[in-house]
Image: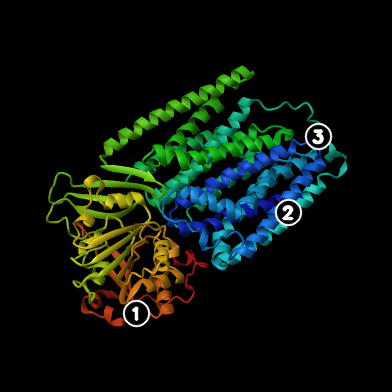
Amino acid sequence: MLIYALSIFVSAFLLFQVQPMIGKFILPWFGGTPTVWSTVLLFFQILLTCGYAYAYWLMRRPDAKRQVALHVSVLLISLLGLALTAQRWPSPLMPGRAWEPIGAELPILHIFVLLAISVGLPYFLLSTNSPLMQAWSSRARPDRSPYWLYALSNAGSLLGLLTYPVLVEPTLPLRSQGWAWASGYLVFAVLACGGAVWSTRGQAARQQVPVGEVEAPAPSRQLRLLWILLSACASLMLLAMTNQLTQEVAVIPFLWVLPLSLYLLSFILAFSSERWYPRRIFEVLLLVATIAFIWGIFSDRATIVFQIVADSFLLFVVCMICNGELYRLRPAPRHLTSFYLMGSIGGALGGIFVSLVAPAIFDGYWELYLGLLFVWLLVVMLMHGTQPASEAQQTRYVVRLLLVFLATATGLLVGVQALGARLHLPLMERNFYGVISVKERSPGNERRRQFVLVHGQTVHGIQFVEPLKRLLPTTYYTAASGGGLAILNHPNYGHGMRVGILGEGIGTLAAYGLSGDTYRFYEINPGVVTLAEGRGGYFSYLADSQATVTTVLGDARISLEEELARGERQDFDVLVLDTFSSDSIPVHLLTREAFALYLQHLAPKGIIAAHISNNHLELAPVLQQVARTFGLTMVVIQAPGDPDMALASEWVLLARDPALLNVPAIARQAEPLPPQRPEIRLWTDDYSNLFQILK
């Protein structure tokens, strides 16, 4: 039936439009870290499970007309809720600033609460639509398999996911996106109501079981458990590989889209026809993909492009195996909602393991290797093991699988500990904001010995151990860098300066602090704060500084807004923006509204120093628009690197008073401004376009 297909396609499209949209909206409130996206995915996986559970429960109600009446009522309630949010908030689905989190504690809980309030009920109903429409379609057309509609659903999801960063985000402000999505949801609600009502028409719809399926046996508990395990494995690999790609290989904007697209593509292929999943071929492909993945991890000759391709290929092969086996084990349409419910439970369990359990038990992203080992166990047992016949054999089969999995997990934990010892890392730890590690350089040479703080793939600071060199500012913050030039050449240097720094690292800039100065750091990652403050004895810039040093924990922009609301204008002589070097940039710190806030905290003769070293984004044109909008003088500083203590860096200095940037030391190192790019609009809280500034 056309109405079922249209309803499923529209709901799937909206499901994967709202995920990146709401993720982008709340991203600034949690420091712009890629982990926000993983948490958003986890929330939607859990809500998807709730939706499938509702569909399963609803289809077990004996009266078809009462099923429809109940579902239509819930749809109308969701429309009413959407209308209320449209009236009370700046845009449907998007809460006002009063909902911003305070501090940096429990970010996952905060994200879950925000998502539940803003998009919970609409997303819940969108997630129910595919299994419900497939079940009702099966009643209306018992002679036709409904599983092709699941492939159609995933095609709609893939289209929704891909069109958001390519078409929607660059052309529509966030508020307009909210209104457009709400309009699409209204269309969906009409189609869903129509499909529900149509399902009650005719004799076939009134039958409790489609013709020819009365004798279809109920799936065994062991088969249901296999559905869960296969789905959990695919979900675990999706999120683990997303973490690997976006935080360990290359923190490139939009790279999170690639794993999810491959995951959806595997559903489309696997559920459209069995011919897309030849078992033996995928066994060979899994072997090839595993070898390529391991080589990319451990070989010094593997390029970033190779690693991205190898990781993506492995994820696609794994997802095709898991989803291909799911399709082989699919039940009769009578048990369709149970099948999807078990699959969604597995997906949620995989997400919970990666987002909640793994950070608590692993220092690095080791769940990816655990997932890969489990995939190989599934391949061996499903493809080469004797197929269980009786229920007792099925029970032993599944128990054996679980026991081998637990043994493998234990072995992996032991191996991880041994690997950590072999790498001689003084410290490695993981939290919501990623993996932080401390590395030791030249341990046998006291004159050159250093400790290095690394967050993912980005160096956040280097400090010498030797007392004579311990106070030297290193990496991006030497005297020749933009930050060093701004501080050393400010008229108030040596006369009680006030310096604000967004992004603490190891606190290197505190090395410039003199008696009477005030240095105020803003940092969202509590792990970084404790290391900068001296935990482990690796770094001491903050403790050694002559200035009065304070650290504010939490998102920098939210903290500055709260200070201004309390009447605590900071009057910074120099305000350093050092949050853009990790490539996954916090866009909300580069908008018109953000700079209006900075200027309120900046002294009349103050300098903003923005560190814009970035492997993938050209940020200078964005700051040119800022300078033009606020009437600021702008210079670009390129600082060279050296083998011992400095890393090459790019800075932009901005000031109201041109004389502050015309001093000889700054003028000598100032680069010509890049050509104006009129196609790049001023970024606002409602609009940004990363595609335009990709290098």
Question: Residue 568: image x %, image y %?
Answer: 36, 68
Of residue 479 and residue 693, the one placed in the foreground of this image is 479
Amino acid found under the numbered disc labelled 2:
Leu
Q: Residue at x 38, y 44 (%)?
A: 296
Q: Is residue 210 left or right of residue 694?
A: right
Is 71 left or right of 319, judged from the image as shown?
right
Report the residue marked by disc 2.
76
The percent position of residue 677, horizontal first and vertical second, equals: 45, 75
Above-or-below relation of 473 to 630 = above
Residue nearest the viewer, comparing 615 with 653: 653
Q: Is residue 279 above or below residue 474?
A: above
Query: Which of the 4 quarters of the picture holds residue 541?
Result: bottom left
Q: Residue 522's x, y, as percent?
A: 34, 60
Residue 64 on image: x %, y %: 81, 40
Inter-mark Cα distance, 3 to 1? 75 Å
**Does the residue at mark 1 contact the one at mark 2 (Cβ under 8 Å)?**
no
- Pointer 1 residue: 656
CA–CA distance in space, label 2 to label 3: 26 Å
Amino acid type assigned to the residue bearing label 1 in the image: Arg
Circle 1 sits in a helix, a strand or a loop, which is it? Answer: loop
User: Mark 3 or mark 1: which comes first in sequence?
Assistant: 3
What residue would you read off at disc 3?
Answer: 208
Of the two numbered discs 1 and 2 on the same chain, state the one appearing first in sequence: 2
